[in-house]
Image (cartoon, grey):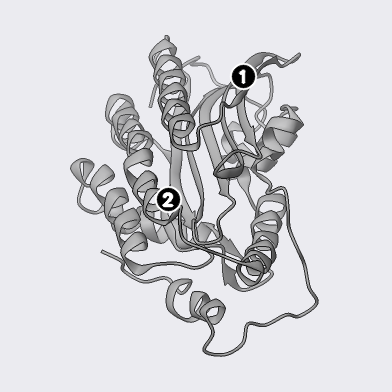
Amino acid sequence: MSAPHDSRALREYLLALQRQIIDALESFDGQRFRTERWTRPEGGEGITRVIEEGNFFERGGVNFSHVFGDRLPPSASASRPELAGSGFEAMGVSLVLHPRNPYCPTVHMNVRCFIARPKDQASSTPVFWFGGGMDLTPYYPFEEDVRHFHATCRDAVTPFGAALHPRFKAWCDRYFFLKHRNEPRGVGGLFFDDFNELGFEQSFALTRSVGDAFLPAYLPLITRRREQPWGERERDFQCWRRGRYVEFNLVWDRGTLFGLQSGGRTESILMSLPPEVKWRYDWQPEPGSAEAKLFTDFLPPRDWV
């Protein structure tokens, strides 16, 4: 399938999405996000928006990037070996938010588009694909919150085909899984990649719907739980579970690998890592405890809606 010759609509949407999300998060937290504009020597630019030690968010980032290159990195061409060595254009918005309160979940969202321009084909027609999704990583979950998050994800994609939500939900469960731990990272949500089967306009519309669903999916949860009291025990467990988040992002995440392999800005790529983390040797939660309930009642994949 061919990509549009003009990618301005993609860029304009992503920049507007970044602004919309930042405005809502600044209003919620009461503290401003730091803004850094950067350029990539090999081609491209981005806007990194970061909050650290906010009133509510311990760390968070909402990043926009639009980069170019002469050779598609291995992490992007792994599922499309015929495009290895192609020139590329990639743009997207990616966010991770780490609240301080352990009763408020960490969240990730990403929407992106790749355009590859094969060098060894007679036709110069570019190839495009979209990707993205969102997923929730709670520490002390509430069933109504997880159901709300999944229902909002479902409603974002169902207008584009009834089969998409079960497919993208299962894809998310498979993707955000720590194979070396045999353990899910969180309670899932949506994930899709290498997606172009609806044609450019409808695939773009689907991706917009996912991006636009983020605030309705997440803000009600943290609004509901922000005043929940917590203590040293909850904080200790949160920091331990954050270690799993770090392990996934550094070992398995394709977005992290793409950013590093393509010569992206390291500070922006690694803003997803939480500021305080703990590891312990072979620690296990006490059976029947609130901490154990995360593993028995929430992490195993299930149909939440």
As helix, strand or loop, the secondary structure at mark 2 comes to: helix
* Residue at x 50% of width, y 56% of height: 105
Q: Earlier in the sequence, mark 2 or mark 1?
A: 1
Q: Is residue 66 visible?
A: yes
**Foreground label between 2 and 1:** 2
Q: Position of residue 235 (x, y in %)?
A: 64, 64
Query: Does 288 sit left or right of 237 as displayed?
Result: left
Give x and y (percent) for residue 67.
Answer: 62, 20
Q: Is residue 177 above or below residue 205?
A: below
Q: In this view of the protein, can residue 74 be seen by the observer?
A: no
- Front residue of 170/80: it is 170
Please give left or right for residue 105 compared with residue 239 in the image.
left
Q: Quadrant of residue 44?
A: top right
The disc label shown at residue 197, or none: none
Residue 127: image location, x then y, percent = 47, 25
Q: What residue is drawn where x is 64% and y is 72%?
A: 233
Number of numbered discs present? 2
Mark 2 residue type: Ile
Which numbered circle lies on residue 222?
2
Name the kind of residue labelled 1 in the image.
Gly
Please determine whether, in this image, residue 127 is positioned above or below residue 273.
above
Does residue 140 appear left or right of residue 149 in this picture?
Answer: right
Residue 141: x %, y % from top left: 45, 67
Q: Is residue 99 above or below residue 37?
A: below
Q: Nearer the viewer, residue 301 or 202?
A: 301
Q: Quadrant of residue 160?
A: top left
- Residue ID at (68%, 35%): 269
Q: Which residue is mark 1?
A: 46
User: Label 2 to label 1, Cα distance in Å?
Assistant: 28 Å
Using residue 139 as the reference point, say whether residue 189 is left or right of it.
Answer: left
Q: Quadrant of the N terminus?
A: top left
Helix, strand or loop at label 1? It is strand
